Amino acid sequence: MSAPHLPYDAPFPPVPGGVIPLGVELGTALGHRLTLLSLERWGGWSDLRFARVDVAGQQRLARRVPPKEAWRVRIDGAEVEVFDAVGRGDRWFSNGEVRIVAAPATGATLEVEVELAADAEPLRGSVTLQG
């Protein structure tokens, strides 16, 4: 049995609410750089798109895509539910999405923290959502 892909109380069918480009570098851990690409808003949830690039990795990561437990997301200081994290890739490059149960408004501050590896400091960043 597979896990559900949408939050349990999400409206159906999903209706897109827009995409906010981000281009926010969270930093590098063990030679792997993580960039937040965009935030896709839907009714009741959002998809935070990201890319991870090996830029001289000192070691392979246990997982190419950090699982949902590795992510912490706050909107205007309030932690929101990370519903899922999925992606695809290889040792050198992976990309994916983190599904959060919130659709932040324009002007909100989005704070993201992710642990790429257990023996590395978490990567952190924030951005005020435009347009």
Image (spheres, rainbow, N blue to C red):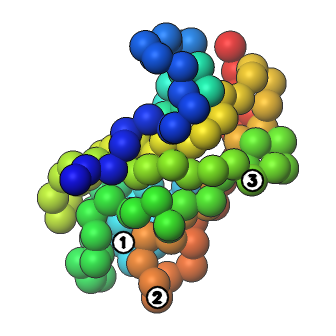
Residue sitting at x 46%, y 17%: 12
Q: Residues within 10 Å of mark 3 (few under 14, many from 20)?
A: some
Tell me how far mark 3 sits from mark 1, CA to CA.
28 Å
Viewer-side residue, 47 vs 119: 47
Viewer-side residue, 86 vs 56: 86
Looking at the image, residue 28 lies above or below residue 110 = below
Q: Select label 3 or label 2 by which is in front.
A: 3
Viewer-side residue, 56 vs 104: 104
Tell me how far mark 3 sits from mark 2, CA to CA.
24 Å
Residue sitting at x 18%, y 64%: 91
Which residue, given by chain and number where applicable, does mark 3 sit on? Answer: 79
Residue 31's disc is 1
Viewer-side residue, 124 vs 39: 39
Hey, which quadrant is residue 5 in on the image? top left
Residue 126 position, x and y percent, is 70, 47
Q: Residues within 10 Å of mark 2 (few under 14, many from 20)?
A: few
Which residue, given by chain and number where applicable, does mark 2 sit on? Answer: 119
Residue 8 position, x and y percent, is 52, 38
The amino acid type found where label 3 is placed reads Glu
Tell me how far mark 1 sits from mark 2, CA to CA.
13 Å
Q: Is residue 88 visible?
A: yes
CB contact under 8 Å: marks 1 and 2: no
Q: Secondary structure at mark 3?
A: strand
